[in-house]
Image: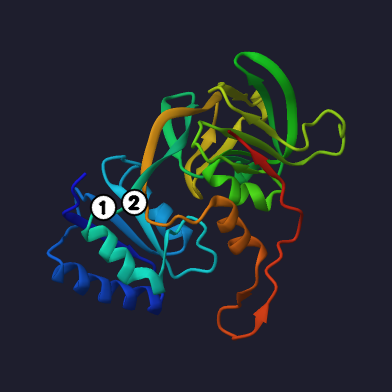
Amino acid sequence: MSIERIKIISSITDESKEVERQLQTKLLIRKFELVETNPDLVIAIGGDGTLLGSIIQEQYSNKPLYVGINTGTVGFLQEVETKEIERFLELLENKQYKTEKLFLVASTIYTPMRKIQTYGLNDIVIYPAREIGRTVRINISIDGEPLEYFCGDELIFSTATGSTAYNASAYGNIIYNPNNAQVLQMMLCHPSIAHPYKVVYNGLTFLNNERITVTPPERSNKLEIDSDGKTVYSGDVVKLDVAIGKRFIRRMKISDISYVSRLRSKFLESWWTPGDGEKCSKKIGHTINVWPIF
């Protein structure tokens, strides 16, 4: 793929804006065209949220490649550190990069009036609508077969990519997925203690494109549906179908760092706390469970 047209999106921090200014100059010197529409490559300067935002802006299109430059705190999805920008530009100019497919989670929301299709790179999360309280009540079935009635805080459907994001903070397994298989993880968050042995506490991982159907009882059918942290619908829901589909985005890869090394450096090793210059341990607050998919 020939890259000529580049779109840059940056977070609002001073560091990100300065990196953007310098990057624009360097790209123009190398005869790349800076554009706002129909890019061949989207560069997101910031943290993982900025990269997600750039993908959402492009409506999850797989036409452009996406790559992130990390000026955020963790930046697990960001491929380039600021000290690596010159090397990144050299590899870009010489077409010495790889691409990988990251599959999206797809959800069809059936409301009393219409059907809504939505996608997520990281996750789709189901909450109770704000006006009805803090507990979500839903029936869950797998390929049409009933699994259980769930009562709790929220339900997370995470891709392998998103398993290091909200899913991990909810004690879900991190999915080690070196071959980019179509993997979906369902995480039931803070279930009601009324039925402690009925709930699948550790979540379920799906490998074969199973269809999960979520059906709220009529008395509790007001739900909020978020995709990658953005609310896509809030109101009456008849049912939702969720699955890993065939749709994907393409991420640029320039690093040979393994997933395991990235996991260790981003989650387990020390870091510099922003703003105070004090070095602190970045041990996350619970055990990381890594589930390998080959």
Q: Amino acid at mark 1?
A: Leu
Question: 80 and 148: which one is in front?
Answer: 80
Quarter containing the N terminus: top left
Q: Who's the residue at 71% across and 65% down the image?
A: 283
Q: Position of residue 69 (x, y in %)?
A: 39, 64
Helix, strand or loop for disc 1: strand
Q: Please name the amino acid that badge 2 sits on.
A: Tyr
Q: Where 252 sits versus 178, above or below?
A: below
> Secondary structure beneath disc 2?
strand
Q: In screen coordinates, is 170 left or right of 49?
A: right
In this rendering, the answer to whether 87 lies above or below 262 is below
Q: Position of residue 98 (x, y in %)?
A: 34, 48
Q: Which residue lies under the disc numbered 2?
A: 66
Looking at the rendering, in which quadrant would you find the C terminus? top right
Of the numbered discs 2 and 1, the one sitting upstream in the chain is: 1
Q: Are marks 2 and 1 in contact (CB under 8 Å)?
A: yes
Residue found at x 59% / y 62%: 266
Q: Badge 2, how many Cα within 10 Å: few under 14, some, many 20+?
A: many
Single out the residue that lies furthest toward the top: 144
Q: Quadrant of residue 140?
A: top right
Q: Position of residue 141 (x, y in %)?
A: 65, 20
Residue at mark 1: 41
Q: Is residue 156 visible?
A: yes
Q: Counting other residues with Cα less than 10 Å from the Cα at mark 1, is it few (<14), some (14-19), or many (20 or more)?
A: many
Q: Quadrant of residue 184?
A: top right
User: At which x and y percent is residue 193?
Assistant: 86, 39
- Left or right: 11 with respect to 4? right
